[in-house]
Amino acid sequence: MADLESRLSMLGANIRAAREERAETQAALAKAIGMQRPDLSTIEAGRQNVTIGTLYRIADHLGVRAASLLPG
């Protein structure tokens, strides 16, 4: 079973990939979901835990299912 650090890293990578697929900057995504860009950066780097609400805001904005961002 993967540890929390690994899972957060994979979650961050999945968020980054979905954001980049839309050619969106961290600043644009952060603004759209009411977050500061440095906070989004730490999420994408896997250094910050994510609340369910934040995960849903990110997924909704990117047009993906929240579950698709979670590591397997």
Image (tube, rainbow, N blue to C red):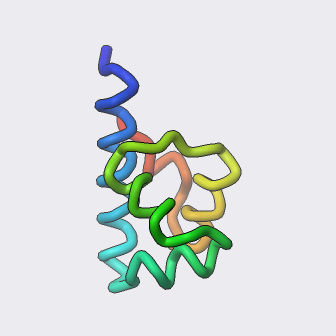
Q: In the figure, is residue 57 to the left or right of 65?
A: right
Q: Position of residue 63 (x, y in %)?
A: 54, 72
Looking at the picture, tell me which residue is in the foreground, 67 or 32. 32
**Figure quadrant of the C terminus:** top left
Q: Residue drawn at (49%, 84%), measured in percent from left and top?
A: 28
Q: Residue drawn at (40%, 54%), measured in percent from left and top?
A: 42
Looking at the picture, tell me which residue is in the foreground, 69 or 37. 37
Q: In the figure, is residue 35 to the left or right of 15?
A: right
Q: Quadrant of residue 23?
A: bottom left
Q: Quadrant of residue 2?
A: top left
Q: Residue drawn at (31%, 14%), measured in percent from left and top?
A: 1
Q: Quadrant of residue 15?
A: bottom left
Q: In the figure, is residue 49 to the left or right of 3?
A: right
Looking at the picture, tell me which residue is in the foreground, 46 or 55. 46
Q: Position of residue 17 (x, y in %)?
A: 30, 65
Q: Is residue 29 above or below residue 52?
A: below
Residue furthest to the top in view is: 1
Q: Residue drawn at (36%, 51%), measured in percent from left and top?
A: 12
Q: Position of residue 7 (x, y in %)?
A: 36, 33
